[in-house]
Amino acid sequence: MNSLHKLVARMQSGKRSPTLHRSRIASGLLLLLLLTPRTYAFDLDQLSAQLAKPAVVRGPLIQEKHLRALPQPLTSRGQFVLSRDLGLLWQLQSPLKQDYRIDSQGIAKRTPSGWQQQPGQDVAAQQSRLFLAVLKGDHSGLSKDFQLQLSGTAEAWQLRLVPNSLLLKQIFSRIQIDGGALVQRIELHETQGDHSVLRLPESQAGDALTEQEQRNFAQ
Amino acid sequence: MPSERWLPRGFLLLLAALLALAAWQWRNGPPVAADMLALLPAGSGDALVQQAEQRMQEPLNRDLLLLIGHPQRDQAIALAQQVGEQWRGSGRFAQVQWSVDSDLAALRDYLRSNRLALLPAADRQLLLEQPQQLIEQRAAQLFDTFAGFSLLPIEQDWLGLGVRAQQALNPGSRIQADLSSGALLLEEPGMTWALLRASAQGSAFDMQEPPLIAAQVAATRAQIETAGGQLLAAGGVLYAAAGQAKATREISLIGGGATLGTLLLLLLAFRRVRVLVSLLPIGMALLAGCTACVLVFGQINALTLVLGASLVGVAADYPQHYLSKSWSNTAGTDGWSSWGALRATLPGLSLSLGTNLIGYLALAFTPFPALTQVALFSAAGLIAAYLCSVCLLPAWLRGLQLSPSPQLLSFSQRLLTGRARLLGKVGSAPLLALLLLFCAGGLWQLHTQNDLRQWLGQEPELLAEAQRIAELTGQQPTSQFFLVRAANPQQLLERQAALSQRLDQAVQNGQLRDYRALSQLVAPDSQLQELRAALSELPQHWQPLLDLGIAPAAMQNELLELQQNNQASLEQALASPLGEAWRPLWLGAHADGVAGLVSLQGLSNSSELQPLVEGLPGVQLVDRISELNALFSATQLSAAELKLISSVAILLLLCLPFGLGGALRVVCLPLLAALAALACLGWLGQPLTLFSLFGLLLITAIGVDYAILMRENIGGPAVSLLGTLLSALTSWLSFGLLLISDTPAIANFGLAISLGLLFCFLLAPWAGTRQATANQAQMT
């Protein structure tokens, strides 16, 4: 579930990708679309463009882990700031207090002595990189790893990602993203039966980072 | 004479048999090995230590590691896949791996039942000493968005021991499996490296495979660079290929150069094309030496061939013995005849062979397989060259009218006159004193140096790539390792765990980067009991988890499972999908029990290892490099003894024709020459190595030839000196060319011999008898 957000982040900044890549990606996605029987009124290119519009998106986050063995989900709350230039700031506030920063360098964790880059050791860090590649405009990576299905309209769309590769399939069964002008909800289904939901219910688009936010990104 | 008829025939028969044997030996391609290290002395350890050394060395020899880099991650992956498929298709490799298709289900099962035994040391300590904190960390982890991916579903791992054990499975590695492609990746800013591993078919050190593999790596490099990427490659096979190419180059340069030089020298001196058949003993020597080595050792090492190529100069000497007599006979009534000259010089020729053999065979008694091979090669080669010179050549040279260059003779005469004039002015004694002074001065400055690195030629490019790979992967396997013996697997694990405790300390102190022990894969029983006892205390601390809504029954069930699970035995664990990296460490059962290794990574100082072993029963540090370097130094002493013994043997042999006084004189001259050569090394600032010492060992044997030639004085001093000069020139040609070798050991050997032979030539005239000197005085 963790990486969903990164996925969104990446898609939003798809616009910055070099033309060469974009065209390759676009053609890859186009092919994908041709293979599906329906013609969409709203396509992946338009979605990328739409999500990349705001320079900054911020708002509260609610994360729910639904475990089969627990009667109620494990719920965490916090704030997030997504910057087109600086990446994603993910601040968990309750019950756990922990900040993360995800950018082209990978994932960093805030410690008393400042941001500490996490080694690319575990799968979570890797997922963040995978999606980050997409953020950089490397869409071909995304369509290689997942089957993408977009439905709905620009105001209410749904993107479904189903993993292709053997290794990924053993971890996720599918990922589902819902949104309108901004991403609103990400659902991640693990192969083993648990699932997580990330809700970004009151996200606001903005033009620039506040000073406080800039400081948070920096240290 | 009948002997003039049957000798050549007999020899030709022998030659035919030798050729047939050689052809049979070469039926499956050249029986040449390129592994320089195989020529080093075997370790002093017992069979188990040697088995362990072989186990550690094997992957280094067979495995090839490629890092395929590209600024774009997906390009790197695509290139690795492309190259991997090409390589797999080539059929040249036993195994090519560029991706993992991990069977996560099997991993999960294993992890579930063995997580307690897999816990890393730090987590064990947490469980034993601060269970409260363990629980709190787990509770926080459940809410963490980026806590990481766990193999076990949360409801099977409430306590989080599975997550902790899982992190220990890939200790310290920076290599990650890409989730979508399964490619093994290393990330650095601006570059993604994809890993590809290949194992060569069979031995990496036969002659055929390494050049083909090196060529394939070169082609792959070109292909990747065209695609905008970068390739790093490392592996024993590449060193073997480079070493082989170098050896081939050097053999052709040294052998070819020496042969060509000798050929020109012969033409210049004797001015008859037919004289060139006297190059035949050279070919015979190489053929016989090679065949004998393959016969005895099953194969011949490239290093032996390089050193053996220098035999050319010595083998070419034998015909000189009688060819050079043509200067004295031309004026006679019957002129020079091949058989006649041979009969006159046969005793001297045989003495030469005897002394040469003694010198070369002395090399065989050093503990170095390399020199044993060289000794056998040379002994067989010298005998063949001698037989060829004695049996066949005179027949082929029969009826040849030699008209040797008179200028050379007069040159030699002038040299002698000059010497006589010099001696007349100052006398021998002051000259000797001067030489001894020179020697003392040189010896004063001489320093010794012995290092394994002298064995290995430098391959800076390969080395740089290997270092870069070690930097990137963080894997720097060391040649040092620990061998742990025990009565049974349980005791082995206990002992490795005890060692691991000290190693953990060393890792914390920064002396060591990492290590791998069997006890990481399977905890010994005593450790497990301790952990299980701590587990039964855990319910007092787990309220934070219950607060999340986890049912107490679920927690109890998990605890019960952890308490009662039968942990996999060492052998089961090694067979499991997790066990792969540990498999090489298990040496299995033998007569006295079982044995296993502990391998090390990134060692800063090997001298810090020995204290770690103290007081640990059954644990032994195996450090081949230190052992070898120590052996090198120890061997210097035995080499000096050998030199003494071989000198005595030569002395005894020479007593027969020359009497004790003459023999002493003939033996002392090359000994003095060796001393002077040693002093020269000192003056030149060159170190005395084991190899220069071996070179000096040979000087006694070869240099004594010149003294014999002068002593026998057949055809007069000037003719004898000319014969000596021709002999010395051919020897310099071959040994001097060893100087160009890239392998420090070989170049050092060549330098010592060249210097020694120079002094042997300069000193040779003193071997003459008084009578001869008197004769010469009359002539001038």
Image (cartoon, coloured by chain):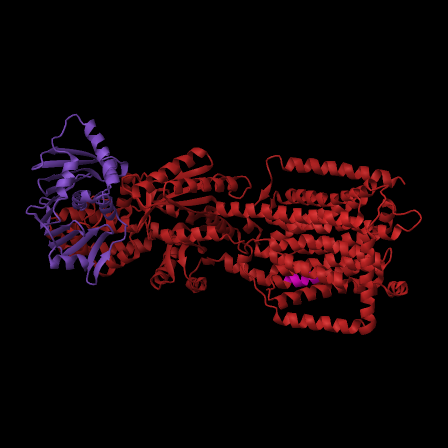
The percent position of residue A31, horizontal first and vertical second, equals 22, 30
Q: Which residues are magenta?
A: B638-643
Q: Quadrant of residue B125?
A: bottom left
**Given the current orientation, which residue lies at the most extreme left position?**
A202
Most common SS among magenta residues: helix
| Above-or-below relation of B81 to B186 | above
The percent position of residue B25, horizontal first and vertical second, equals 64, 37
What residue appears at the point 11 percent right and 53 percent down from the top-left corner? Answer: A208
The percent position of residue B50, horizontal first and vertical second, equals 51, 51
Q: Is residue B6 magenta?
A: no
Residue A99 placement, left or right of B366:
left
Q: Quadrant of residue A70?
A: top left
What residue appears at the point 19 percent right and 50 percent down from the top-left corner? Answer: B146
| Above-or-below relation of A179 to B540 | above
**Given the current orientation, which residue lies at the most extreme top position?**
A37
- Residue B692 in view: yes
**Tint applied to chain B in the drawing:** red
Q: Is residue B642 magenta?
A: yes
| Above-or-below relation of B694 to B64 | below
The percent position of residue B454, horizontal first and vertical second, equals 55, 57
Q: Quadrant of the C terminus of chain B?
A: bottom right
Residue B492 placement, left or right of B148:
right
Say which of B365 and B175 sits in front: B175
Residue B476 placement, left or right of A202:
right
- Residue A169 in view: no
Q: Which chain is purple?
A: A
Q: Quadrant of the N terminus of chain B?
A: top right
